[in-house]
Structure formats: structure tokens, C-alpha cells
Image (cartoon, rainbow, N blue to C red):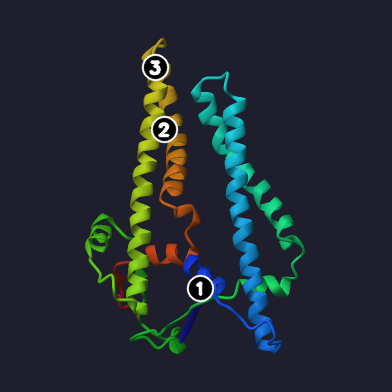
Amino acid sequence: LHIHYSKLDRGDMQAILKKKYDAEDNSEMKQIVKRRQDSVSKHVVSTNFMWAGGGAFAGAVWWSFRRYNYQARLIAIPFFFYFGTFAGRMIGDVCTCRNAEFARDRFLGSLPAKVSQAWTVGVDWADAHTSNVAIHYSKLDRGDMQAILKKKYDAEDNSEMKQIVKRRQDSVSKHVVSTNFMWAGGGAFSGAVWWSFRRYNYQARLLAIPFFFYFGTFAGRMIGDVCTSRNAEFARDRFLGSLPAKVYMPATEA
């Protein structure tokens, strides 16, 4: 039996914050859940400050670079937005007193809302050193992703299994869209360099394009992750999206 703990996602946090507790109940159990709720509330408010800090830094850079061309703005904004998230998180932690929060309370706020149990099938792992079975996992290829995205699920079915496959499908969808942004970013950077170097010979263009295409893929991936909210995706959901579609179990030589 393998137990996997998940992180709190948006729905779990909303469910925790919506709960009401009797203010006159001072039992130990109620004190624990109240502290857990308070810790989650601080985390949510601090996260809002984080995004506000990134937006404030990006807006300030956009205004400060008003006398420069748009290329200079677009180069500077992602870096300052990134630094702004750290400043916003710090300010949010101070405003919510999260920086002075005890490790015990923060641990309560990070406790998992769901526990997934998985049983291994067909292999006795206690005797793994004597077993003649080896398991090899394959990565998702284009056909596997297409098969996952084509599936339709009942929107009214809220069973745990259907929630898992829906989250897996959503994670794969985000990965595909983000990959498209990655290639688009590389192409956009290459086209911009080709046009910017129009007064130079083609050797200079061909020398610069590969480097800018490489950097463009990173910029495109970052933009794609933000547009699809993949940057805020929980590790649990991303893990579901990376699960193999095929499992090969060849017998090893004795």
C-alpha cells in the first residue's frame, strides 16, 4: 500500500476558508482546525500580494521606459515582474503577520486535504530483488496526448477517479498549449532578429538567429505557462499530467 499526499489546491482552500466554527468551543480539536484555517487565510492573502507586487513592478518599468522603444520595455518587464513577486510576497507576509507565524501553524496550513492510496498489481515488491520482472515507463508521445485530450467525461460525475482523470487531462492540455507558445516564442524572436538585422549581410543573420531562437523558446514557455496558469499548477496535477500512457514489463534474464 502506497500513500501519496497532495497539496492544497484552490478548491481545497476555498472549502477550508468557507467553514464556520463555534467561537465558544475551545476544545483542542477546534483550536487545531481554527489555526489551520488562519494559516491558509494568511497564505491566500500573501499570494495576492505576490501577484500585486509583480504587476506593480511591471507597470513601473513600463512607465519608466516610456521614452524607449517597445523592444526595451518587453525585455525589461519579465525580469522586474519576477523580482516584484518576491517583494510582493515579503510585503504580504509582513501585512498578514505570516513572517512571525510559528512553524507549527504553518505546518497545519500545509497539511494535505486529500490522501490517495494506490495498490501495486501483479508484482510482489517484498521480493523485488528476486523478481524477474522489470518495469519501464514510457513518456507521453503525440498520439498519447491526443488520445487523452479527445476523451469526454461526464461533468456531473464527481467521483474521485473522474476527478483524477479530469485533472490529468487538464494538465496535459496546459502542457500542449504551453509547448505551442514555446515554439511561437522561438519563431517570433527569430523573425524579430531577421528584421532587425536587415541592414546586415545574411551571414550575420544566420549567426544570430539560433541564439535568439533558443532564448525565445524560454520566453515563449514562460508566457505560455502564465497564460495557461501552468506556472501556478500544483506538483500533484503536473505529476498526473506526466504519468506514462504505457507500461512495459519485460522479463529480465535470469
The image quadrant that residue 127 belongs to is bottom left
Q: Taking 4 as reference, is 180 left or right?
A: left
Q: Which mark is residue 15?
A: 1
Sequence-first disc among 1 and 3: 1
Q: In the image as oriented, which residue stretches furthest toward the right?
A: 100
The residue to which callout 3 is attached is: 203
Q: Alpha carbon of mark 2 to alpha carbon of mark 3: how far?
A: 16 Å
Viewer-side residue, 4 vs 225 = 225
The residue type indicated by label 3 comes to Gln
Q: Position of residue 99 (x, y in %)?
A: 74, 60
Cβ–Cβ below 8 Å for labels 2 and 3?
A: no
Q: Residue at x 72, y 75 (%)?
A: 104
Alpha carbon distance from label 1 to label 3: 60 Å
Give the quarter of the figure containing the C terminus: bottom left
Q: Of callouts 2 and 3, which one flags the residue occurring earlier in the amino acid sequence?
A: 3
Residues at circles 1 and 3 in contact by the CB criterion of under 8 Å: no
Residue occupying image coordinates x 68% and y 54%: 92
Tell me, yes or no, if residue 113 can be seen here.
yes
Q: How many marks?
A: 3
Crowding near the residue tagged with mark 1, few <14, some 14–19, many ≥20 C-alpha atoms within 10 Å: few
Residue at image coords 37%, 78%: 160
Residue at image position (65%, 85%) is 30
Asked whether 51 or 148 is in front, the reply is: 51
Q: Position of residue 9 (x, y in %)?
A: 50, 67
* Secondary structure found at label 2: helix
Kindly identify which residue carries mark 2. Answer: 213
2 or 3: mark nearer the eye: 2
Q: What amino acid type should be assigned to the residue bearing mark 1?
A: Ala
- The amino acid type of the residue labelled 2 equals Phe
Residue 252 visible from this viewpoint: no
